[in-house]
Image: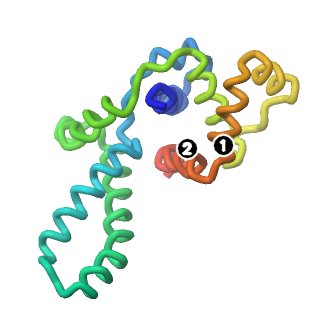
């Protein structure tokens, strides 16, 4: 799983750099991405902890209601924070602020092999098609890719068609395009 997470990052980084998406070219990119969901979760956790410590310990019903109402607000603030910081990532102070999230990513990613990167590329291609950013691959190319690597076809279907994987892939891309 960590290898596929690394493949996703490398593929997104290569796409954003505008290089041709081949496994060999994608392999040269970094495992880290400032807009990673792992960094997002760390930011949300820190913001929620800070906010809820400041709120103190209200009666139980207010405690539950405050969590229900404020967790989406904290998530939205975390999303905007990550998006803004990613756009300013070239500034050294911003890099220092984002360093804990990138350090956490080092625990959740591993260098992928070329077949894992093929899965990342295929999943990205399908997301780009779904978003209207790219045209579908010709049928003979899709068949060639699927027959060359059976794991690729299975993983791509899982990644693109499962309910939880689509938002993660689109999430990474939507920050780039806004």
State whether residue 45 is above or below residue 119. below
Q: Residue at x 19, y 87 (%)?
A: 59
Residue nearer the viewer, 172 or 154: 154
152 vs 67, left or right, is right
Q: How many marks?
A: 2
Residue 42: image location, x then y, percent: 28, 49
Local crowd at mark 2 within 10 Å, few (<14), some, or many (≥20)? many
Residue 134: image location, x then y, percent: 71, 39
Q: In the rendered structure, find residue 31 and report the number of the disc placed on it.
A: none
State whether residue 174 is above or below residue 66. above
Whether residue 112 is visible to the viewer of this picture, yes or no, is: yes
Q: Residue at x 32, y 63 (%)?
A: 77
Whether residue 20 is visible to the viewer of this picture, yes or no, is: no
79 vs 174, left or right, is left
Q: Residue at x 52, y 15 (%)?
A: 113
Q: In the rendered structure, find residue 169 and report the number of the disc placed on it.
A: 2
Local crowd at mark 1 within 10 Å, few (<14), some, or many (≥20)? many
Residue 58: image location, x then y, percent: 17, 84
Residue 107: image location, x then y, percent: 31, 31
Query: Which residue is at the far front?
Result: 60
Q: In the rendered structure, find residue 160 and report the number of the disc placed on it.
A: 1
Q: Are marks 1 and 2 in contact (CB under 8 Å)?
A: yes
Instruction: Say which element carries label 2.
Output: helix
């Amino acid at each position: 799983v960590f290898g596929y997470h690394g493949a996703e990052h490398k593929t997104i980084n290569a796409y954003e750099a505008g290089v041709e998406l081949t496994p060999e070219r994608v392999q040269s990119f970094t495992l880290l991405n400032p807009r990673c969901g792992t960094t997002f979760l760390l930011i949300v956790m820190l913001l929620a902890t800070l906010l809820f410590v400041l709120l103190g310990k209200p009666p139980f019903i207010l405690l539950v209601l405050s969590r229900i109402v404020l967790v989406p607000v904290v998530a939205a603030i975390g999303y905007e924070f990550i998006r803004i910081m990613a756009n300013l990532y070239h500034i050294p102070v911003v890099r220092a602020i984002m360093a804990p999230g990138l350090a956490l990513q080092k625990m959740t990613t591993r260098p992928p092999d070329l077949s894992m990167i093929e899965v990342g590329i295929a999943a990205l291609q399908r997301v780009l098609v779904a978003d209207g950013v790219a045209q579908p691959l010709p049928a003979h190319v899709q068949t060639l890719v699927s027959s060359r690597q059976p794991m690729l076809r299975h993983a791509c279907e899982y990644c693109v068609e499962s309910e939880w994987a689509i938002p993660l892939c689109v999430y990474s891309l939507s920050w780039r395009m806004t």
